[in-house]
C-alpha cells in the first residue's frame, strides 16, 4: 500500500507505473500487462452490462469469441460476480462496480494491479470487502497489487507499505509500524484518523 498526504505524489507514481505519464528522467521497470482501477468506477466502465464491460478490455487481443467468453467468466468468478454477468452497470453498487473494473484486469491476465483510492467512495462494509477481495486475488493468483489509500484500517490487509512525502519515499516496511507512525502524527496535528 502507498500512503501519503494530499499532493505527496501517490497518483503520479501510479500513472508513471501505468505508462500514462512519461518520466522526465530515470527508468521504470514494471511487469506487464498492468490493470488500473480508479477511485471512481464511473470513470472507467464504458459498456452497458457487466459481461460486455469485462469483454471490452479484450478487444485489442483479437481472441476468438469462445476464448473471450471463457476469460470473462473466469474473471467474473474470481471477483464473485459471475451471477451478475448480464446485469446493467447502472444497477450495480459502488463496490460491485469496482469489482467489475478488477475483473477487467484479471481477464487481460494482468500481472500488476494499480488501485488509486478504490474504496474512497464506498461505505465501510463494501470498503473492507473490496480490500479482502484484492488480498485474496494476490494470494490465489500471484498478482502484485499496489493500492493507494488514506484509510489506515486498510493497512491491516497489506504485506508492506510505503509512505510518500513530496514525491519521495520517506518510510517503508511493516504496515503496523507505519500505521502507528501516521496515527501519532494525526494525533499531534489534531486530524481525525480515518
Ligand atoms: N502531470 C503533472 N505534471 C506536473 N505536476 C503534476 C502532474 N500531475 C500532478 N502533479 C502535481 O504533483 C503533485 C502530486 O500530485 P498527486 O496527484 O500525485 O498527489 P496524490 O498523492 O495522489 O494526492 P491525493 O491524496 O490528493 O490524491 C501535486 O502537487 C500535483 O499538483
Ligand atoms: Mg491521488
Image: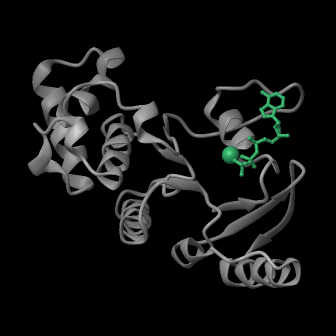
Identify the coloring: one colour
Q: Position of residue 121 (x, y in %)?
A: 48, 54
**154 relative to 94, above or below:** below
Q: Quadrant of residue 28?
A: top right
Q: Which residue sits at x=19%, y=31%?
A: 49
Q: Quadrant of residue 146?
A: bottom right
Q: Which residue sits at x=13%, y=41%?
A: 85
Q: Which residue sits at x=34%, y=25%?
A: 46
Quadrant that contains the C terminus:
bottom right
**118 relative to 22, above or below:** below
Q: Quadrant of residue 170?
A: bottom right
Quadrant that contains the N terminus:
bottom right
**21 relative to 186, above or below:** above
Q: Position of residue 120 (x, y in %)?
A: 53, 56
Q: Position of residue 166 (x, y in %)?
A: 90, 50
Q: Position of residue 144 (x, y in %)?
A: 52, 54
Query: On the rendered structure, is 79 left or right of 17?
Result: left
Where in the image, quadrant-wise, is ligand 1 located? top right
Q: How many marks?
A: 0
Query: On the rendered structure, is 96 left or right of 186?
Result: left
The answer, for residue 71, to whether it is visible in the render is no
Taking depth in this image into account, of 171 and 100 the one nearest to the observer is 100
Query: On the rendered structure, is 191 left or right of 46?
Result: right
The answer, for residue 167, to whether it is visible in the render is yes
**36 relative to 59, above or below:** below
Q: Which residue sits at x=14%, y=36%?
A: 70
Amino acid at each position: 500500500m502507498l500512503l501519503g498526504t494530499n499532493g505527496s505524489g501517490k497518483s503520479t507514481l501510479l500513472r508513471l507505473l501505468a505508462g500514462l505519464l512519461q518520466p522526465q528522467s530515470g527508468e521504470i521497470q514494471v511487469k506487464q500487462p498492468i490493470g488500473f482501477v480508479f477511485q471512481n468506477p464511473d470513470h472507467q466502465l464504458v459498456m452497458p452490462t457487466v459481461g460486455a464491460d469485462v469483454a471490452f478490455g479484450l478487444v485489442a487481443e483479437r481472441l476468438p469469441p469462445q476464448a473471450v467468453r471463457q476469460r470473462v467468466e473466469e474473471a467474473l468468478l474470481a471477483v464473485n460476480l459471475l451471477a451478475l454477468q448480464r446485469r446493467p452497470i447502472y444497477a450495480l453498487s459502488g463496490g460491485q462496480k469496482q469489482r467489475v473494473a478488477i475483473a477487467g484486469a484479471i481477464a487481460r491476465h494482468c500481472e500488476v494491479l494499480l488501485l488509486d483510492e478504490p474504496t474512497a467512495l464506498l461505505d465501510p462494509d463494501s470498503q473492507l470487502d473490496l480490500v479482502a477481495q484484492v488480498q485474496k486475488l494476490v494470494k490465489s493468483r500471484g498478482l502484485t497489487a499496489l493500492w493507494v489509500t488514506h484509510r489506515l484500517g486498510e493497512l491491516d490487509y497489506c504485506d508492506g507499505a510505503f509512505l510518500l512525502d513530496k514525491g519521495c519515499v520517506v518510510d517503508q516496511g511493516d504496515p503496523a509500524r507505519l500505521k502507528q507512525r501516521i496515527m501519532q502524527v494525526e494525533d499531534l496535528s489534531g486530524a481525525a484518523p480515518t
